[in-house]
Image: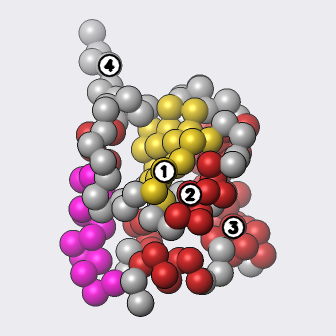
């Protein structure tokens, strides 16, 4: 089964995060840590963000969120969220970035890329985000 079919037919990520004790803890802890460390009103690229379970609250917090996901139905659902833009794309092969993002989230792909070739897929996904980051200001 290919990746798109698997995540199109399986249980939704937001259901897992909302309905299981471990999922709820994961969601709350992720939100707590991101809120603690994100700069105010950041431009955030949420790669593999699914239907926008994190993008929704990030946008509500005032961030500009752009989501990329491999499942077209997830992209459509995320694009309907207020303050979120979304497009279809594979975390392992992102369109050329424009170095405009303050933060790149790669939460889902790092644990969902579990096919036998995941040993090469995870580093590819991480490397694919590099052109998207805004260069950090240099210390004086």
Label of residue 87 in the image: 1
Whichever of callouts 1 and 4 sits on the residue coming sooner in the sequence is 1
For numbered disc 4, what is the local secondary structure?
A: loop
From the viewer's perspective, is residue 9 above or below residue 140?
below
Q: Residue 30's spot in the image, x, y percent?
A: 61, 55
Query: For mark 2, what is the residue?
Result: 75
- Circle 1: element type: strand
Q: Do residues under tags 1 and 2 come within 8 Å of each other at their CB atoms?
A: yes
Residue 80, compared with residue 1, is above or below; it is above
Q: Which of the two discs, 4 and 3, labels the residue nearer the N terminus? A: 3
- For residue 14, the mark is 3
* Foreground tag (2 vs 4): 2
Q: Please provide percent x and percent y for residue 124.
A: 24, 62
* Residue behind mark 4: 137
Give the farthest residue toward the top: 140
Disc 2 to disc 4, C-alpha distance: 32 Å
For the point 72% across and 73% down, the residue is 15
Q: Is residue 125 magenta?
A: yes
Visual colour scheme: secondary structure
Q: State the residue lying farthest toward the right.
A: 19
Magenta-colored span: 115-128
Q: Split into 4 quadrants, where in the image is the C terminus? A: top left
Q: Quadrant of the N terminus?
A: bottom left
CA separation in Å, label 3 and label 1: 19 Å
Residue closest to the eye, 96 or 107: 96
């Amino acid at each position: 089964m290919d990746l798109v079919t698997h995540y199109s037919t399986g249980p939704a990520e937001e259901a897992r995060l909302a309905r299981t004790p471990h999922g709820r803890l994961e969601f709350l802890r992720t939100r707590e840590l991101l809120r603690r460390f994100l700069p105010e009103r950041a431009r955030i690229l949420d790669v593999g963000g699914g239907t926008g379970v994190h993008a929704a609250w990030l946008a509500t917090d005032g961030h500009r969120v752009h989501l990329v996901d491999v499942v077209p139905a997830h992209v459509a659902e995320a694009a309907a969220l207020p303050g979120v833009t979304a497009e279809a794309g594979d975390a392992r092969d992102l369109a050329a970035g424009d170095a405009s993002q303050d933060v790149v989230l790669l939460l889902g792909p790092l644990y969902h890329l579990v096919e036998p070739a995941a040993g090469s897929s995870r580093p590819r996904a991480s490397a694919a985000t590099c052109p998207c980051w805004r260069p950090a200001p240099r210390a004086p």
